Structures are given as C-alpha cells and as structure tokens.
Amino acid sequence: MCGIVGGVGKLDLRTYLLSGLKKLEYRGYDSAGICYTESGKTILSKVAGRVASLEEIVPENIHPTVGIAHTRWATHGQPNAQNAHPHQSQRKIFSIVHNGVIENFRPLAHQLKARGYSFNSETDTEVIADMLERFYLRSGSVIESIAQTMEALEGSYACAIMFKDEPERLYFMKKASPLLIGMSDGCMLLASDPVPMVDYTDRFIDVDDGDYGYLTPTQVKIFNGRVEIEPRFVHRNVDSFRSDLGDYPHYMIKEIEEIPGVVVRLIDNYFDGEHFTFNESMIETLRHTKKIHFLACGTSYYASKMGAKYFRPLGKEVLVSIASEWAYDPYDITGDTVFVLVSQSGETADLIRCQKIINDRDGISIAVTNTKGSTIERKATYSCLLYAGLEVAVASTKSYVAQVCFLALLFAALENEIGVVLDIDRVVDSIRNIISRKGEIEALAEDCKEVRDAFFVGRGYDYLASMEGALKLKEVSYVHAEAYPGGELKHGPIALIEPGTLVVGLVSDPEVSSSIRNNFEELRARKGRLVIFSTAAVANENDAFVANDVKPYLAPNVLVVAMQYFAYYVALAKGLPIDKPRNLAKSVTVE
Ligand code: M6R
C-alpha cells in the first residue's frame, strides 16, 4: 500500500508534497516522511503517525528544487519513524520512497551484508536504496544503476528516487504498483494517483510496468529495458478526483448521503429512458458465455455475491470468488467463462493479480470500477464505470450500493427487463427516507456503543446484506462482528449467544420472513439482544428500524444504508477516527 509523491522544478514543493501526502493518506497512514534538496543539501524528516505530525516539523520557509514524500501502511517492520520512508543508501547518495513489496529482499539483503552494508530499518525498501548505490558505484550512471536494480528486484514497486548530486532531477521506476507523472508549468510531478496533482495539472502519463527514467523541470525521459520510450501525456478530466467535506464532519457520512444521487447518475449512464446503453459487444459476449465468474475483495466481494444472485436466472453457471484466493488457485479459465472484476479503486493488488492471470491466458474480463484510468479499468477486455464520484472514507459505502445497482442493471440489460429501472428508482426514494431518519439509527447506535461482539443475521438477500453490515461495523467501530445465515446458527454459532449479546437482524424478504423470525425467537430465548432492521411489508411492531418497501431483491441496498449509518454512529459514539480506521487503508495495493 502506501502513497508516494515527488516533484521537481518551479513550484512550492513543500505545499505540494505535504498536501499531496494528505490526499494519499487513504493508502496508509501509520507513518510519513519527506526528503528534499535545498541549496545542494539533502534534508530528511520522518515521523510515526499522520502527515499532520510531519507537517509540524518541516520548516515553512524552505525552497527545495526536488523532493519526495511518503505515507505508509507498514508491510515490513513496525510503523515507527525508523521504518518510515524515505530511506537512504548507506552513503546517503540515494534517497527513495517506495510503494509495493520486494519479495526477494532477504536474499538481496544477505548479498549486501556480505559486501559490508548494514541496515537502519526493518523494511524491504532500504535494500532498494543500497542496490542502487552498489550498482552506481560500479557503473557511474544513475540510469544504469536503476536498470540493474530492476533486473535484481522481484515483487512490486513504484519508486521516486533522488540522487544527491542532481538537485534538479527526479528519478523513478515502476513495476506492478501504480505511478503517474504530471506536467505543469516549469515543473514535473509524480504520485501514486492523480489526486495530489489535480490542483496543478490535467496532463498525465500512466507509467507502464518496467518503465524507469527521470524528470527535470521541463523534460521527461522514459526507458523500458534499455530502450527509450516516447513520453505521451494524456489529458484527464480531473474533476472526478476532487472531493471536499463541505459541512460534513466525516467523509463516511457525506458519502452515505451521496448515495441517492449516485444511483440516479448510474441509471442515467446506463439507461436512456427507453433502452439500456451498455456496450453491445459486451452484452452479446455475456449472453453467449456459459459461465460468469465474479472476482473481488471486501465490500466489492459482498456486492458481487448479490450480483451473482441476480444473474442466476440467466441459466448460466455463476461463481463468485475472493480474488486473493482465486489468484492462487485460478480454476475455471476456459473460453466459456467471462470474468467480472468488481473494484471501487481498480487498484486492488489481489484483483490485479487475477487480471494478469486472465490476460495471460487470453481470457475475457469485464471491469466494474469507480476509477477511470485505474489498472483494472485499463487492462480489462470491457470496462464499466460506477460514476459514484471519489470515495475518500476507508469504509466503502456509496460504491457498494452503486456496485449492486450496476449489477442489477446489467442483469436487466441481458434480459431486456426495463422494469428493473423503476425498481431501482424506488430504492432511491427509500434511501432518501432513511437519510431523513438517521437520528433514529443514531439513537440505536448510542445504546450499542459498549458492545464488543455482534452477530448479523439474515436469510437469502438479507444474509448477503448482513455480511456487508458486519464488515462495516468491524472496520469503523472495532466491534467484533460476524454475519450468519439464520438457519446456520443452530449448527454452532448460537453457542456464543449470552445474555445481552447484540444480534442485528435483517428481514425484508417475504419468502423467508417467517423462518428468520423463528431464528430471532431462538436467539431471544437465549437472552440475545435483538436489534431488527426490516422493511414495511414484513415489519413487526418491535422492530428497531423499519425502512420503506422496495422489491425484495433490492431491499438489501436499502438496509445496507441503515447498517452503514449504524456503524458510523457506533464509531462516532466511541470517538474513533471514522474515515481512517486503525490498520486499514482505502486502497489495498499489496497482496
Ligand atoms: O477498491 P476495491 O473495491 O477493490 O477494494 C476492496 C476492499 O479492499 C474494500 O472493499 C474494503 O473491504 C473496504 N474497506 C470496505 O469498506
């Protein structure tokens, strides 16, 4: 994970690097650091904790010519200042920031130790700096040392590199981790994604795997292998990368309340009032394939589970796999399968690995992502955007609802079922109603703020929504939460129910409402504390929150919004850092 920024040339580098890091904190935020050259001197500062702490120790009146900075999600070594990036080579001639994981760093460290190198950190990154130095001392060329280092490294990396004797040059190299170059007046910028650069430029180069090179204030040099590549800047609409909090206290609640607008925009993008407007060739491919196989992680995986249930009436085999599992057991790669890769960020490492496997075998993939220009979007056979706008909070909210509605629309397009659009319109109204009644959910959450464990229980579609509800509660409120299908409780989990154990029950589907209500009674008989979220058609008078009716196959989208508020308000009552929960990062860019 981790976010990197770098810049060279005529700009206020302190502002760019520090504000850029803040915008990248969604990629990790356990330590941060900066390195810059001023009047020929290289200055390094690092802290444990957030970028705000780094900002306090970087003098305001600096005028660097080149600089790099990093916000970290620890993969190797504890999140302390010593392990924070930038790292420097033994003779301090190279300073680097790195996003990725070097898989062979132990043997490389061993080789370096044998040549007299010692290490100041527990990271895999320090090895890169020392490898650069070692090759530079032999060749006398920075570019050559980068090429040789890349040949030696296994794993993933996007690196920005400063060389002590070149105060107006910023080097880079990239494999598997994302890296972009931005061009502005009199300066060149680097970052893990466009967000830090959008106030400076709308012209970017997506650095390709295997590329390396350098930036000067006015020039870009790119090599791949030993061949020079023509740099090609492309214009990107940067508006979709902006988001500010406005009057909201947190991005999570802001993004929950954007959901109705997101769903309306989604419909507008895929339905023109009479017809669905999906790519025709993609629709035909899906119609003719024998199998549809969803791959995703986290929230996107739960959304895919819902989507898969929609697709079952197509009479095809429909599978859903967790990307990190499938990547190491990639079954089902035949010409009969279309893979659907669902990802908010489009940069999730496990999913990128799956995509590579699919592409290497000439498989067909459809990317469903919120991020235009992301790796998944660019590398899929077909790609479809969610148009949910930038999602900043680590906890996915609006993108879950967008993903599920997208998959419902895609199914509808395959079956020419225009009625689905009307069904989704009602979802919008029902979610607006929940937003207007969020105070009711806040009161329920306030009552539950002391709980340590929670069970989320439902059947059918409601069970699928329970899984997402439990994930939201655990990630932002640090409550141990698990989802179970109502019928499974008696097969083991009910042993954990003690007097007062919180059970969040979901019921919206009339087909299973009587059986799930029986399960709730079994839990009450063991003195579990039930908080039931239902929809009007199946509501009981003691239910804690009753949402307006929508079609049962879409009801999870409505109840999930109530679950999102519930998790948000429990975290708020506990005073937790809602948008950046501990140990997490928004975009999981390492496997
Ligand atoms: O960007 P992606 O949708 O590929 O991310 C997948 C998961 O990392 C993500 O959904 C994660 O589970 C969220 N923190 C959930 O809120």
Image (cartoon, helix red, strand yellow):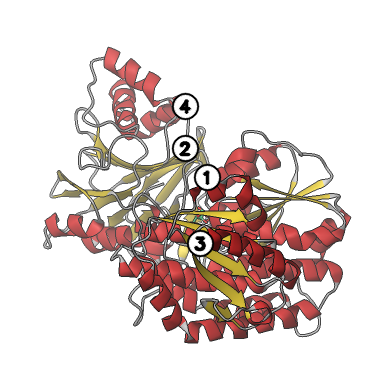
How far apart are labels 1 and 3 at the CA level?
A: 34 Å
Q: Is residue 124 above or below residue 216?
A: above
Q: Judge depth for marks 4 and 3 and give the one in front.
A: 3
Residue at disc 3, secondary structure: strand
Task: Give whichever of discs 1 and 3 has the lower sequence position.
Answer: 1
State which mark lies toward you, 3 or 2.
3
Q: Which residue is mark 4?
A: 151
Asked which quadrant contains residue 508, the reply is: bottom right
The tag earlier along the polypeptide, 4 or 3, is: 4
Specify whether tag 2 is near ligand 1 (CB below 8 Å).
no
| Secondary structure type for disc 2 | loop
Disc 1 marks a residue whose amino acid type is Ala
The extreme front residue here reads 525
Q: Which residue is mark 1?
A: 349
Q: Where 362 falls versus 27 (above or below)? A: above
- Secondary structure under tag 1 reads helix
Label 2 – label 4 distance at C-alpha:
12 Å
Instruction: Check disc 4 and report its element: helix, strand or loop.
Output: helix
Question: For the residue with label 1, is its CB less than 8 Å from the closest atom of ligand 1?
Answer: no
Question: Residue 156 has which mark?
Answer: 2
Closest to the camera, between mark 1 and mark 4, is 1
Characterize the local packing of mark 3: few (<14), some (14-19) or many (20 or more) Cα atoms within 10 angstroms.
many
Q: Earlier in the sequence, mark 3 or mark 2?
A: 2
Identify the residue under disc 3.
503
Residue lying farthest top?
A: 114
